Amino acid sequence: MPPPVGLDPFHTPPDQLEKLRGLKHKRGLACEFDCFFLPGSSYYERGRPCFARFSLLVERNRGLVLGIGVESGALAPGEAAGRNLVAALLRIKMLPETIYIRGEPFQRVLQLLCDELQIQLVPADCLPFLEGAVGFLSKSMFGPADR
C-alpha cells in the first residue's frame, strides 16, 4: 500500500508524556521506526478480521528489534504510529538520540513528540535494518510449515 499522507500530529497522553520525560537519553543510540500493514496478517475488530498495522523500532547499529506493536488496521495510521512509538520507548526505558523514519508522512505525526523529548527525527528513503526485520518477520509468518 502507498505510504499514508496528510496525517495529523500525535498527541501523547499527559501521563505517558510525564513517564517519557523521566527517561534518560542513551548516548549514540539511533533507531529506525515505521508503522505499516504486513500482508497476510489480520486482526479482529468487533468480531471481523481486518489487516493488522505493525510498528517496529529497530536499533540501527546491530539491527536489534527493540519494540514491536500490533494494532487494528481500522486505527488511523498516525495514531497507531504514535501509540506504538510511545509504548516501545516506555518498554525499553530509554530515549534514542535519533529516530529514522520512512519519508515524511510520519514526520508530521511524530515531530511534536520527538521535539518534546529532544529526539532528532530524520526522514529517510531507506531503513535497512527495519526492512531486514520485516523480511524476517514475513518469512517467519509465511515460510514453509516444515521448518
Image (cartoon, helix red, strand yellow):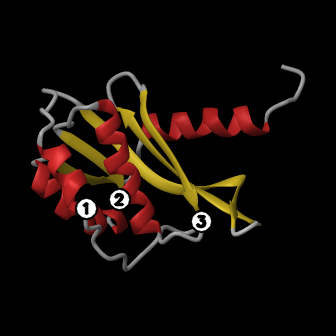
Q: Mark 2 — residue?
A: 82
Question: Which residue is farthest right?
Answer: 146
Does dot 1 land on a helix, a strand or a loop?
loop
Image side of residue 97 versus residue 53, left or right: left
Disc 2 to disc 1, C-alpha distance: 8 Å
In the rendered structure, are the residues bearing label 3 and label 2 in contact, judged by CB atoms less than 8 Å apart? no
Q: In this view, does 49 lie above or below 122?
A: below
Residue drawn where x is 47% and y is 55% of the image: 35
Give how far apart the Cα atoms at labels 3 and 1 are.
Answer: 20 Å
Mark carried by residue 40:
none
Please indicate whether residue 115 sits to the left or right of residue 10 in the image: left
Judge from the rendering whether residue 79 lies leftward or rightward of residue 11; answer left or right: right
Residue at 22% across / 32% down in the picture?
A: 94
Tell me the number on the disc at residue 12: 1
Mark 2 surroundings: few (<14), some (14-19) or many (≥20) residues within 10 A: many
Of residue 130 and residue 11, the one placed in the foreground of this image is 11
Q: How far apart are marks 3 and 2 (CA)?
A: 14 Å
Q: What residue type is labelled 3?
A: Gly
Q: Name the residue under label 3.
A: 73
Disc 1 marks a residue whose amino acid type is Thr
Q: Name the amino acid type tagged 2.
A: Gly
Going from N to C along the chain, the mark reached first, 3 or 1, is: 1
Q: Where is residue 55 in the image (x, y as percent from the top left)?
A: 48, 49
Q: Quadrant of the C terminus?
A: top right
Q: What element carries label 2?
A: helix
Please indicate whether residue 49 sits to the left or right of residue 28 in the image. Answer: right
Disc 2 and disc 1 in contact, CB within 8 angstroms: yes
